[in-house]
Amino acid sequence: MDNRTEDKGKKDIVSLSYEELIFEMKEIGEKPFRGKQIYGWLHEKLADDFSKMTNISKTLQERLDASYEIRKVSVAARQISKKDTTEKFLFELCDGCMIESVLMRYDYGNSVCISSQAGCRMGCRFCASTIGGLKRNLAPSEMLGQIYRIQKLTGERVSNVVVMGMGEPLDNYDNFLKFVTMLSDEHGLHISQRNITASTCGIVPNIRRLAQEGLQITLALSLHAPNQEKRKELMPVADKYELSEVMAACDYYFEKTGRRPTFEYSLVKGVNDGAEDAKELTSLLLGRNCHLNLIPVNPVKERNFERPDRKNALAFKNKLEKNGINVTIRRERGSDIDGACGQLRRRYADI
Ligand code: SAH
């Protein structure tokens, strides 16, 4: 992706990795340690203006300002859930695109759910993020920026990151990969890769590619159906990649990284929550070292999918558990502010 904005022709400096920034500074005739200092300002101290970089000379600050930009991820709205302490942030990007992120406070620390694209083109039937299609990919700086902005706004440290907001990370592969590398870089926030999870609808070649990158992030696979036929009804991506290929790619990810994958399964009343579904799902997952997360489907006003009632969801879970599947029902967070899975969208008119 082109990291220059059209109007000003300034380079997106926050998307440059540690090595790239040091190289860049050398290129403009500065000492490499300047690159190190600037990287620290951008990714550790989270500076959003060159003028705040106090150990950098005024001349260099001005020089940087003329050729580079610190892309804005500005908060347009902030909502806090009344049910729990989950907060949702609506952010505006430099070109007016709107994206959403969610902050969840847990006993073990703060987890942020970020968007990887403005909109989405995967078309999952039950998901709000896909309504209106894909606007554009996010740059690494815009994925990082969501976390940086939330840390700055709340004054609280973020310890876990899930790429489960709007968009499909493996449909924005290069930027996503760079984002992971930079987020876990010791010169930045240094969030452990084991505390980063990326969720995909199942783009098989890119799951295989990711498996070979030498990363330690957790892969979450959006399964949502126990067989190919049902999956096709819910997820257009299944037309392209057969369920058997998706499962083989997940096995390969585990084999290469040693990281146990998570399977996500949105429970939809009358669609994939029956006894037969539980049985089929059991045989699909049995013998695999994995975790299954059940998510009673969250309401999206344009869609008429319903969630099973609590009793049925529990019965579904128990059937799997009895057969030896490692399963949980995901704790619902922020549903009253449309901050739960599948509720994030490119909104702004109706907030
Ligand atoms: N594109 C990625 C990540 C985004 S969605 C992916 O498909 O995995 C994060 C998770 O929420 C996915 O498992 C997605 O299928 C699920 N989801 C989407 N809409 C939902 C809804 N209405 N209710 C519950 N989960 C939903």
Image (cartoon, helix red, strand yellow):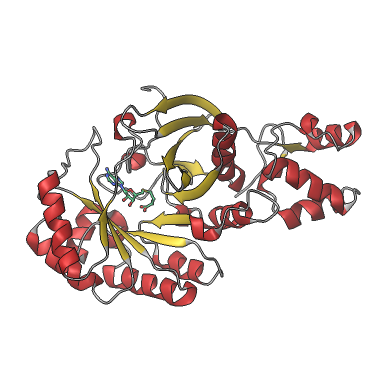
Left or right: 310 as drawn, with respect to 55: left
Question: Picture quarter containing residue 242?
Answer: bottom left
Question: Picture quarter containing residue 254?
Answer: bottom left
Q: Position of residue 25 (x, y in %)?
A: 84, 49
Number of numbered labels in the structure image: 0
Instruction: Report the residue that reaches farthest toward the front.
Output: 107
Q: Position of residue 274 (x, y in %)?
A: 9, 57
Question: Picture quarter containing residue 310?
Answer: top left
| Camera-side residue of 173 and 292 | 292
Left or right: 210 as drawn, with respect to 124: right
Q: Relative to residue 77, is residue 181 depicted above or below?
A: below
Q: Position of residue 348 (x, y in %)?
A: 42, 25
| Camera-side residue of 249 and 254 | 254
| Camera-side residue of 216 and 202 | 216
Q: Quadrant of the C terminus?
A: top left
Q: Residue at x 49, y 70 (%)?
A: 211
Q: Position of residue 134 (x, y in %)?
A: 42, 42
Q: Residue at x 62, y 32 (%)?
A: 72
Q: Relative to residue 109, is residue 292 depicted above or below?
A: below
Left or right: 349 as drawn, with respect to 94: left
Left or right: 304 as drawn, with respect to 221: left
- Examine the rendering and report whether any part of residue 12 can be seen: no
| Camera-side residue of 2 and 158 | 158
Q: Residue at x 38, y 71 (%)?
A: 249
Q: Relative to residue 147, is residue 337 depicted above or below?
A: above
- Examine the rendering and report whether any part of residue 37 can be seen: yes
